[in-house]
Image (spheres, rainbow, N blue to C red):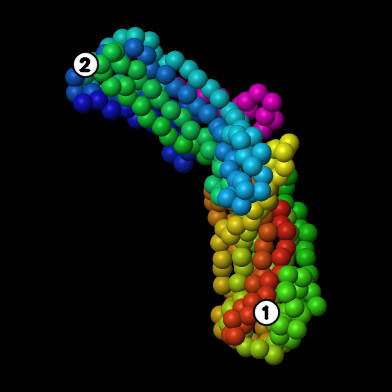
């Protein structure tokens, strides 16, 4: 019985472009183990998919949406030989540099239609009739530099006249909500902050929510498909809140599901904040605010 593990020197597995990933392949075997080679492959890929409705609308585009290679590195760590019974450590180093025409390594990201992942895979190839041993692990890339967040406060007033996505103005109850976002350019490692005040509402309010949305655009020369999906929803007001009372806006950005705003020729990852007010009669209104996310 033999096993292999990939042990990284960084326990959190978080790296930046230009760094060197160091670690070791740990091989454990109760008996001596013959092998033909021990190799390591690292790759970073942006995987793109289309929603079902986009495929129906842009069938010619469907086949042209292919994964984008961001990074690639292969190395042979050991040639044909035999490992004695016990534990053997084989060290390795992998430089993190963009691949081909890619200018920089994108951050690790988990989306619905876009996913950016970096994986390291080890293969211990054994002689004929023996099963090869493989192991794979993921590393996480973060920007080391880039655009920095600078405060761009936004003041807002939400009322029946400001709502653009309502079917009929007559269906909207009379109300007035004002407030501010401290900035629409936000640092991922810091919370989004601001304040909201309900000045008046003729209908009782059930809840006030902050809804963080990701807007993923996948494209090719044949066209573009744009889809918005919810990342998280936070209730900041429960019940018919007091009029004139300042309600803090405070949202922490989730790791992996949010990343610095991305704009490339093939795809975009953008973000929006919705302020959603739900009345007791189930009527709901929302106001949308595009936001830009940065690492610093």
Q: Secondary structure at mark 1?
A: strand
Q: Main secondary structure of the magenta part?
A: loop
* Image quarter of residue 6: top left
Q: Residue furthest bottom?
A: 202
Q: Residue at x 64, y 72 (%)?
A: 276
Q: In the rendered image, which quarter contains the N terminus?
A: top left
Q: Is residue 97 magenta?
A: yes
How far across and down, in percent of the image, does residue 94 sit?
51, 24
User: Which residues are drawn in magenta?
Assistant: 92-105
Query: In the depicted view, which residue is nearer to us: 93 or 103?
Result: 103
Image position of 145 with respect to 80: above or below: below
Label 2 belongs to which residue? 32
Tell whether 28 sits left or right of 293: left
Using the image as rendered, state which of residue 179 and residue 217 is in the foreground.
217
**Can see residue 179?**
no
26 and 173: which one is in front? 173
Secondary element type, mark 2: loop
User: In the figure, 41 relative to 128: above or below?
Assistant: below
Image position of 24 with respect to 12: above or below: above
Give how far apart the Cα atoms at labels 1 and 2 are: 71 Å
Question: Would residue 134 appear left or right of 57 to someone viewing this image?
Answer: left
Q: Image point 60% across, 72% down: which residue?
A: 209
């Amino acid at each position: 019985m033999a096993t292999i593990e990939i042990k990284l020197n960084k326990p959190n597995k978080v790296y930046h472009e230009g760094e060197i990933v160091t670690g070791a392949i740990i091989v454990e075997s109760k008996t001596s183990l013959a092998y033909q080679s021990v190799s390591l492959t690292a790759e970073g890929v942006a995987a793109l998919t289309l929603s079902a409705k986009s495929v129906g609308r842009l069938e010619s585009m469907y086949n042209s949406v292919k994964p984008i290679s961001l990074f690639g590195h292969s190395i042979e760590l050991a040639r044909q030989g035999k490992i004695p019974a016990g534990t053997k450590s084989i060290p390795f180093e992998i430089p993190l540099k963009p691949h081909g025409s890619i200018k920089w390594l994108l951050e690790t990201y988990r989306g619905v239609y876009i996913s950016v992942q970096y994986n390291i895979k080890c293969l211990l190839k054994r002689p004929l009739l023996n099963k090869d041993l493989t192991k794979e692990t993921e590393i996480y890339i973060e920007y080391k530099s880039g655009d920095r967040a600078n405060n761009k406060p936004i003041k807002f007033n939400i009322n029946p006249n400001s709502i653009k996505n309502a079917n009929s103005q007559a269906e909207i109850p009379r109300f007035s909500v004002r407030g501010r976002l401290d900035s629409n350019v936000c640092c991922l490692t810091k919370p989004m902050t601001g304040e909201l005040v309900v000045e008046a509402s003729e209908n009782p309010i059930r809840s006030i929510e902050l809804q963080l949305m990701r807007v993923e655009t996948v494209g090719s020369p044949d066209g573009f498909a744009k889809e918005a999906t919810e990342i998280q929803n936070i209730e900041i007001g429960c019940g018919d809140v007091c009029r004139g009372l300042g309600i803090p806006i405070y949202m922490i950005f989730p790791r992996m599901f949010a990343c610095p705003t991305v704009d490339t020729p093939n795809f975009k990852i953008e973000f929006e904040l919705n302020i959603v007010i739900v009345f007791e009669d189930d009527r709901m209104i929302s106001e949308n605010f595009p936001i830009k996310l940065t690492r610093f």
